[in-house]
Amino acid sequence: MSAWPDPDRTVVADFLKTSQFRERSCRIYHGILRSFDDVARQHPAVDQPMLEAWLREMEKRWRLSSLLNQVCIVDRFLDYLVEIGLIANNPIAVLRSRYNIKQNKPIWRALASPNPDAALAALRRPAPFGSVLGDFMRDHVMLVRRRGYQYETQTHWLLRFDRFLQAHPELAGEPLETMLARWAAAKPTRNHAAECQKLGRILTKARFRLDPNIPPKRFNPQPERAVAREHRRPHIFSPADVRRMLDVARSYPSPHAPLRPSSLYTMILLAYCAGLRRGELAGLDLGDVNLPSGTITVRETKFYKTRILPLPDSVMVELRAYLDARRRTGAPQDPQSGLFWHDHFNDRYTPVVVSKMITTVMRRAGFKPPSGRAGPRVHDLRHSMVVNRILQWYRSGINPQDKLRFLSTFMGHRDINSTLVYITVTQDLLQEASERFRVVGAPRLNMEALS
């Protein structure tokens, strides 16, 4: 007996109409969802067995690799069914929660395998903070975040250590120092050794807060210093390099998404001229652009800061052109809609996709190898903005020291020390600083020597 709550077969059409997909996508999605509808009518519930049966039916028409690239529409459809109350739970979300998986696609891949239960069991991840020190570490993270810190990187360190402890239950009765020593010996890399030192410092300080009779332990700073020496220097793009990337972005091949080249062009422009992070680019709303005042508003980003950035007239001209192109493609004009919008799912680009797209432009422009992590990063555009701005101040006769506090505010930094990290000493910058010293500082030294 079927429990599918759609006797009139209207829910698929309503979903596609509500989502406002483009016409070509609607035709593809309608076929996928109609087959889902057909299989659901043959089962008593929308659950794991029903999903497995649908995948087996679809494999008769699609290659598995192609099918797994299309199941995202079913994910959205299941969320829609929960939203309108036709089903109680999204079965994919239930399986993610049961096996502690962050993404949907591994679940779908497991369901499409010959033995779904075994494949799902192999995906199982330890529960967060489920080790013998789990409650202690979770309480520490909550305490730090209540004080206003995001504490993301440190939480990842703690979660990795927690998973290690869950995989080694024999350490449950050992002292903290023994656990840390075993964790440090688990990987031979310098990065891991440095992370273990920082993790140990965090945990011993947290323990000292609970029990002042156990003083914090002093750790060897050498592993952290070794990693710092090997840390990759930022790649500083010259203005000519940025213009080259903009030209590549404008000619980016995208026959099925005509707005994408313009979106990429504007992303790179704002990443360099406004020094925006990738998450800030993805988080911009249409209403954050104020054309009359020539500003953009960047809301609630790192350190919970919101800032209003004035932009040059040339940048505002390009922004106005992008907004016109965006409007012509039929993008939503609601002020809360994403500034960088795509019509595939009628949604904004995510930070990960923004990073991948700009990285592709860097590869096409010849600044980064065809594959791998070597070469410039998206964040290096932000570094380049700072270095080139200081270089321009030197050439204009402005003392950068007088302007750094304004630059720190413009970048959204917590304090001026964070901005100093971005000042990479290039050959041009060193030459300008030396020339400024020759003109201003050297005569004063000579006068003091004569007196």
Image (spheres, rainbow, N blue to C red):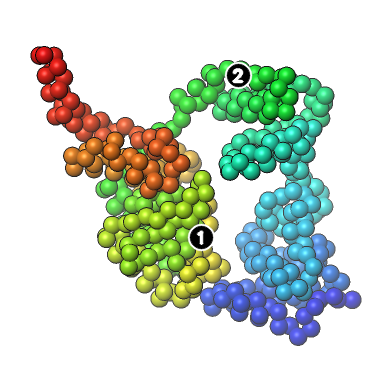
At x 59%, y 27%, the residue is: 198
One can see residue 355 in this view: no
- Compared to 110, does 78 lie above or below? below
Residue 203, position as x, y percentages in the image:
67, 28
Q: Is residue 337 left or right of residue 96?
A: left
- Compared to 132, does 28 lie above or below? below
At x 87%, y 71%, the residue is: 44
Q: CA distance from mark 2 to mark 1?
A: 43 Å
For disc 1, the marked residue is 349
One can see residue 108 in this view: yes
Q: Which mark is residue 337?
A: none
Between discs 2 and 1, the one toward the N terminus: 2
- Compared to 422, does 14 lie above or below? below
Q: Kindly give the residue lying farthest to the front in the view shown.
A: 451
For disc 2, the marked residue is 219
- Compared to 338, does 305 lie above or below? above
Q: Is residue 45 left or right of residue 234?
A: right
For the residue carrying disc 1, how many other residues have a C-alpha within 10 Å: few (<14), some (14-19), or many (20+)?
many
268 or 302, which is in the foreground? 302
Quadrant including the C terminus: top left
For the residue carrying disc 2, how many other residues have a C-alpha within 10 Å: few (<14), some (14-19), or many (20+)?
few
